[in-house]
Image (tube, helix red, strand yellow):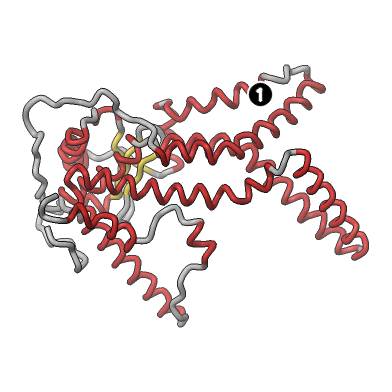
Amino acid sequence: MPYPTDPPHPEPHDTGEARDDLDYRHKSGRLHFGAHQRGVDATAFGQLVLHLPGTVMSLLVLLLISGGLDAWLGVPLWIPPLIWLASGALVFHRPTEDFLARYLLRLQRPMPEEYARLDPVWREVTARAGVDGRTYELWVEDSQDLNAYAAAGHIVGVTRFALDHLSSSQLAAVLAHELGHHTGGHVWTSLLGYWYALPGRAAWYVIRLVVVFAVALTSYFSWPATAVLVLVIGIVTYSTITQLYGLPLVLLVTPYLIAAVGRRAELRADRHAAALGFGPMLAQVLQTMHATETEAKRQALAAAGARPAEPGLFARLLSTHPDYPTRLHRLRPYLQPHR
């Protein structure tokens, strides 16, 4: 198939459902599932490694809290850290995933007609991948954005707009991309890293609030007192960094590295979908999303009377998704007729 140049537009339909143009290669007959349903690819392993500094900082915070609990209440020092480490298993706990999907991600269980649309497409995608599709839970977001999600250990979500406006082959491409995140281990590794970094993040948030409040309070009464306070904070910060062998400085860099690995994970998920035969369809969806976002930005800037501006360097470095031209360029080998 030639490389697409014009963004596709949803075709009108009378039934309210997108056209079914998917080649159901595995609609009948026995399915053969792979021996390994999911794994940990290089990007997932990289995410685990990059989350280690945050995990260590969280462990130090919990040890400090445990010391206070041990002194005041006699709680053994090892109990809070052990409970915290064991709590990571909740990533794969189905009731917890259900709670995350409903109340944090704002997803809904598919209605009967939505499930009838999703199920055969999902079965075809997972059959081509050699994965048991029953392992995962399909969810729907009531949104007019073209989007999909892979979350927790078994959540695959898609927006109602995608259900209504994408063809079956394009919907399959989107689902295959999200399946690639699951089978590559991107989802659970990033969620585990985020979860284990929460105590450290909370401690940093509290420290920052206290410092800002103290500086604002002293500056209200006396500038010399503010200077002394800033000097004390600087000494304490330097001492802490020295005592922890520079670990806090590493935490300043890790968000950029994690974002870079996240961009790599997106490209790997794209490649996963393309390898299953959905490369041209995924390219069409990406072009549509690119055109839609570009037009929305143009209209917003025009309404505000502002000039178009590209995101700054640090904003681009913190982005977890590659830009659309990069993703489309990486898909080009899968758009040739011989592929």
Q: Residues within 10 Å of mark 1 (few under 14, many from 20)?
A: some
Against 287, residue 306 (above or below) is below
Query: What's the amino acid at mark 1?
Result: Pro
Against 282, residue 138 (above or below) is above
Image quarter of residue 330 = bottom left
Give x and y (percent) for residue 66. Answer: 73, 25
Task: Tell me which residue sits at (24%, 30%) in the image.
Answer: 131
Report the quarter where the N terminus lies: bottom left
Give x and y (percent) for residue 27. Answer: 9, 34
Give x and y (percent) for residue 314. Answer: 54, 62
Viewer-proximal residue among 308 and 304: 308
Against 234, residue 247 (above or below) is above
Q: Is residue 248 left or right of residue 282?
A: right
Image quarter of residue 149 = top left
Give x and y (percent) for residue 226. Answer: 87, 60
Q: Is residue 104 left or right of residue 73?
A: left
Task: Tell me which residue sits at (11%, 46%) in the image.
Answer: 22
Can see residue 101? Answer: no
Can see residue 87? Answer: yes
Task: Tell me which residue sits at (28%, 60%) in the image.
Answer: 329
* Element class at badge 1: helix
Q: How many numbered discs? A: 1
Image quarter of residue 189 = top left
Residue receiving disc 1: 80
Viewer-proximal residue among 11 and 29: 29
Task: Tell me which residue sits at (70%, 32%) in the image.
Answer: 60
